Amino acid sequence: SQKIEQNSEALNIQEGKTATLTCNYTNYSPAYLQWYRQDPGRGPVFLLLIRENEKEKRKERLKVTFDTTLKQSLFHITASQPADSATYLCALDDKIIFGKGTRLHILP
Amino acid sequence: EAGVTQFPSHSVIEKGQTVTLRCDPISGHDNLYWYRRVMGKEIKFLLHFVKESKQDESGMPNNRFLAERTGGTYSTLKVQPAELEDSGVYFCASSQGTYYGELFFGEGSRLTVL
């Protein structure tokens, strides 16, 4: 069955630095991959979608890459701010299969 | 424009009782999804409606769970009878047309079964 792994449960990054989160998947070839943000007690909020034929997608301080050979997506937040602290979820297409998420803490 | 709304936000019931969760999607969104997050686990797909039809219900745990979507508008998810392992947060999401992706989620309904 399909499996998604996000590199770590929690990640601490100093304010102003670039945060990089990893999403790896197996036994699947998604047509696209998505990233969501989830704050405590709230529902996930869509951030970015990247298709299999796209290498990179940007939105403001966010950048996503998609390597279908490595079966990996990287999610970058540049010039990170404390307000970026949240759980970030990677999701594969179709039924939108979610990873467990990475809790990102931006330290002031 | 109103987002996806879910009710109740939190429900505490005893094992064996029945609970009905409701989801109102964004107006005009044909796709409606139910997901569940059990503590410590990832968000898991339950089922997908396209308008009033069940497109995919492969994630429904067992026949104690019944989902309906009346007239292609709001949806309900009934758990009867509830078991301890049904505790978790139930999320509803909606999206437009045939474009898979960019799901709009509700805030979730937390279910606690004692």
Image (spheres, coloured by chain):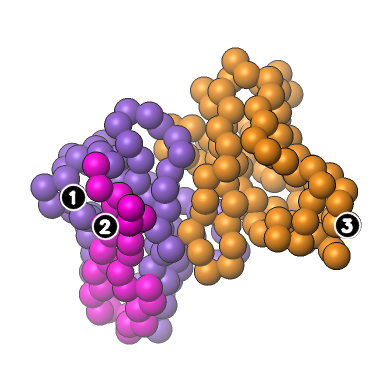
Chain colours: A orange, B purple
Residue B25 lies in the magenta stretch: yes
The amino acid type of the residue labelled 1 equals Thr
Is the residue at mark 1 from the same chain as the one at mark 2? yes
Picture disc at residue A26: none
Q: Which mark is residue B73?
A: 1
> The residue under label 2 is which amino acid type?
Asp
| Chain letter for mark 1 | B
Magenta span: B1-28
The Cα atoms of the two marked residues, 1 and 2, are separated by: 7 Å
From the viewer's perspective, tell me whether residue A26 is left or right of residue B49. Answer: right
Determine which residue is flagged by label 2: B24
- Towards the viewer: A40 or A10: A40
**Residue that extends furthest to the top in the rendered view of this protein:** A53
The residue that label 3 is drawn on is A14
Question: Of the residues under marks 1 and 2, which one precedes in the sequence?
Answer: 2
Circle 1 residues within 10 Å: few <14, some 14–19, many ≥20: some
What residue lies at 76% left-to-right and 61% top-to-bottom? A82
Q: Chain of mark 2?
A: B
Farthest-out residue, left: B71
Answer few, some or many: residues within 10 Å of disc 2's Cα (few below 14, many 20 plus, some between 14 and 19).
many
Determine the residue positioned at 58% across, 20% down: A52
Cβ–Cβ under 8 Å for marks 2 and 3: no
Look at 38% across and 77% down and name the residue there.
B10
| Residue A20 pos. (x, y %) | 79, 43
Magenta span contains residue A10:
no
